[in-house]
Amino acid sequence: MLTASGAKPDILVIDGHDGAGKTSVAQRLDPEYGRYVKPFGGTLGDHLAWLAGTARTSSERWAEVDATARAAVEAVLERHADAERLIFDRHWLSMFTLLPEEYRVAWYPVPHTVLCWTTLDVTLHRLDRRGEAVGDIATHRHYIEAYADLAARYRVPVVDTSELTPEEATAEVVRLAGLRPVSDPRSSSRRDGG
């Protein structure tokens, strides 16, 4: 995806289900490896999930889910066009867990991505430790499996964070992604969530 001005920062996506460690890793990469951005932050992620839930019974909502998510990514690209590299905390892989196959083509080509993954037990433990409502266990199981299936299908490298510290998981992402530091880390950091 290009910005309206035609600028295209290098992109690395750190994706995964809640509690998988993606935010911890993505934030640790800023500023040395790029600028942290979170296109579906705030209430937008919950709104997209809600829209997708209603779309299951109302097919016209799928287009709204897709357009809303792609607009959020485009807005981040526009806002951060000056960055050498953007480190996305969620992107296409999260949307592919929601969207039907026919809506995925608009996301191609997908940017380089690493999946942070963990087991259901670790997910639930981490959410509880953060003070977040655990919610429906079957829903967590579904998304954990969906991310793993999509990673296999699209050949996305996976970091199993189940027994790794955030620092170890970050080092593994750097290795798998073949990351090199950006030329001027001080100019890359502008962490403001989107």
Image (cartoon, helix red, strand yellow):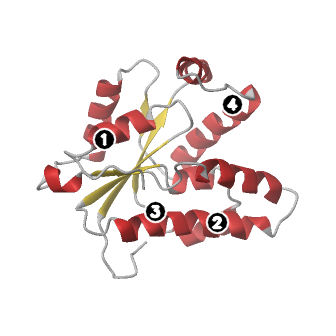
Taking 105 as reference, is 189 left or right? left
The kind of secondary structure element at disc 2 is helix
Q: Quadrant of residue 123?
A: top right
All told, the count of numbered labels is 4
In the picture of the structure, the residue carrying the numbered disc 4 is: 141
Q: Is residue 109 visible?
A: no
The kind of secondary structure element at disc 3 is loop
In the picture of the structure, the residue carrying the numbered disc 2 is: 66
Measure the C-alpha gap from mark 2 to mark 1.
29 Å
Measure the C-alpha gap from mark 2 to mark 3.
15 Å
Vertical relation: 175 (above or below) 52: above
Taking 122 as reference, is 52 left or right? right
User: Measuring 71% from the left and 60% from the top, which residue is drawn there?
Assistant: 100
Q: Quadrant of residue 133?
A: top right
Q: Nearer the viewer, mark 2 or mark 3?
A: 2
Earlier-in-chain disc, 3 versus 4: 3
Taking 76 as reference, is 47 left or right? right
In the picture of the structure, the residue carrying the numbered disc 3 is: 110
What's the residue type where badge 4 is placed? Arg
As rendered, which of 124 and 150 lies closer to the eye?
Answer: 124
Q: Nearer the viewer, mark 1 or mark 4?
A: 4
In the picture of the structure, the residue carrying the numbered disc 1 is: 176
The kind of secondary structure element at disc 1 is helix
